Image (tube, grey):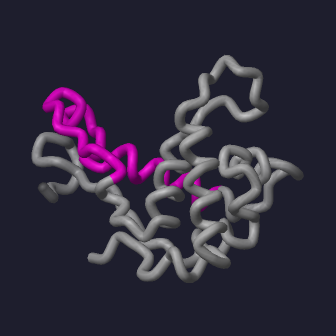
């Protein structure tokens, strides 16, 4: 299964400078301390997923699979972080109080707007939970 959006750089960015401004805003957000008084606290898994999709990367490279046997035995998915980031992005498509999407997009410093966010949510690959051999659910891996 393809876990990336082909030619994402060409589809979501106007030109090379727009893409470079996006990378600059991301770098600044990734290195910024949580205690600096920003109205957004920190980057979440959903931000990481969006970043990978916008760069045209395979989203599986942005998340480490869960391998700890006790976590898997207790029902954690192998792709737990990636699955919950996916569900968070999907939930942003629903109607929320004014400003929730703006707050989510704040780390990107205006380089990504709501229109692009909603377009990416529509086009991103479907991610389903993967269960392990240890868990009580369906055996996959």
Q: Decide whether residue 126 is among the magenta residues.
A: no
Residue at the top extreme?
35
Q: Quadrant of residue 68?
A: top left
* Left or right of residue 55: residue 134: left
- Give percent across and percent down for residue 51: 51, 56
* Left or right of residue 140: residue 7: right
Query: Would you place residue 64 above or below residue 139 in this image?
Result: above
**Nearest the eye: 6 or 23:** 23
- Give percent across and percent down for residue 16: 58, 72
Quarter of the image for the N terminus: give it: bottom left
- Give percent across and percent down for residue 27: 54, 43
Q: Residue at x 76, y 45 (%)?
A: 103
Numbered-mark total: 0
- Give percent across and percent down for residue 33: 60, 23
**Nearest the eye: 19 or 66:** 19
Residue at the right extreme?
98
Q: Residue at x 36, y 51 (%)?
A: 62
Q: Main secondary structure of the magenta part?
A: helix
Q: Decide whether residue 68 is among the magenta residues.
A: yes
Query: Would you place residue 134 above or below residue 48 in this image?
Result: above
Q: Quadrant of residue 89?
A: bottom right
Q: Quadrant of residue 7?
A: bottom left
Quarter of the image for the C terminus: give it: bottom left
What segment is highlighted magenta in the picture? 62-91
Q: Residue at x 59, y 50 (%)?
A: 24
């Amino acid at each position: 299964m393809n876990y990336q959006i082909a030619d994402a750089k060409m589809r979501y960015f106007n030109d090379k400078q727009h893409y470079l401004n996006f990378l600059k805003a991301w770098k600044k957000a990734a290195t910024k301390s949580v205690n600096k008084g920003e109205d957004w606290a920190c980057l979440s898994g959903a931000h990481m997923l969006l970043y990978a999709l916008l760069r045209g990367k395979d989203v599986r490279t942005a998340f480490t699979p869960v391998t700890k046997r006790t976590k898997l035995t207790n029902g954690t998915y192998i792709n737990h972080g990636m699955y919950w980031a996916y569900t968070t992005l999907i939930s942003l498509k629903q109607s929320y109080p004014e400003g929730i999407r703006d707050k989510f997009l704040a780390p990107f410093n205006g380089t990504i707007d709501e229109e692009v966010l909603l377009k990416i949510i529509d086009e991103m690959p479907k991610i389903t939970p993967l269960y392990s051999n240890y868990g009580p659910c369906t055996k996959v891996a």
